[in-house]
Image (tube, rainbow, N blue to C red):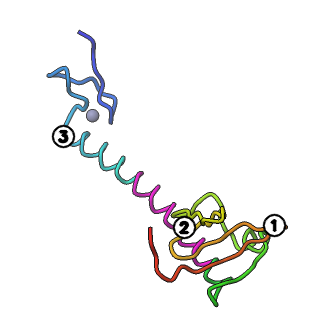
């Protein structure tokens, strides 16, 4: 019979062949760590999205504004993350970070909007 090793500590496992851990403690440790890592990942993404939203809000206090891409980048805006996309009938694609949206326009400029009534 092939020897199996604990996924957590690497010790050989005795007993049933379908066991993945040598002990309940190792199983708990393993799952707690996986859970912590996925939570950490989610927290990191949430932080980026919140930062993006606050940058947009800061640059767009009146609900509509025009800003340069460099201005957004200089404040740390991350274009890789948004919460949703809104395509208009006229073919424009707005990216939103929660209620704050932006649309790429000519010459590396962005048109910022604030969605009053948030709809997913
Ligand atoms: Zn173990």
Pick the front one: 91 or 15: 91
The residue that label 2 is drawn on is: 49
33, above or below 60, in the image: above
Ligand 1 found in image quarter: top left
Mark 1 or 3: in front is 1
Q: Is mark 1 on a helix, strand or loop?
A: loop
Q: Are marks 2 and 3 in contact (CB under 8 Å)?
A: no
Q: Residues within 10 Å of mark 2 (few under 14, many from 20)?
A: many
Task: Please name the residue shown 58% across and 63% down the image.
Answer: 87
Q: Is residue 30 left or right of residue 15?
A: right
Residue that extends furthest to the bottom in the rendered view of this protein: 62
In the image, the segment drawn in magenta is 37-55
* Between discs 2 and 3, the one toward the N terminus: 3
Q: Which mark is residue 54?
A: none
Tell me the CA gap for discs 1 and 2: 21 Å
**51 drawn magenta:** yes
Name the residue beneath numbered marker 1. Answer: 108
Answer with the quarter of the image where residue 3 lies.
Answer: top left
Q: Check the picture and name the quadrant holding the N terminus.
A: top left
User: Is 61 placed above or below 40 here?
Assistant: below
> At numbered mark 2, what does the secondary structure look like: helix, strand or loop?
helix
Disc 2 within 8 angstroms of ligand 1 (CB) = no
* Residue bearing the label numbered 3: 24
Provide residue 120's location: percent of width, then percent of height.
44, 67
């Amino acid at each position: 019979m092939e020897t199996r090793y604990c996924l957590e500590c690497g010790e050989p496992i005795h007993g049933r062949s379908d066991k993945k851990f040598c002990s309940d403690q190792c199983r708990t440790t393993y799952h707690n760590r996986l859970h912590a890592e996925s939570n950490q990942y989610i927290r990191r993404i949430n932080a980026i999205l919140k930062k993006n939203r606050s940058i947009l809000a800061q640059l767009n206090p009146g609900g509509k504004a025009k800003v340069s891409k460099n201005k957004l980048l200089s404040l740390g805006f991350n274009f890789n993350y948004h919460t949703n996309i809104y395509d208009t009938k006229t073919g424009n694609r707005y990216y939103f970070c929660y209620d704050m949206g932006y649309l790429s326009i000519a010459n590396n400029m962005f048109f910022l909007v604030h969605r009053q009534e948030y709809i997913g």
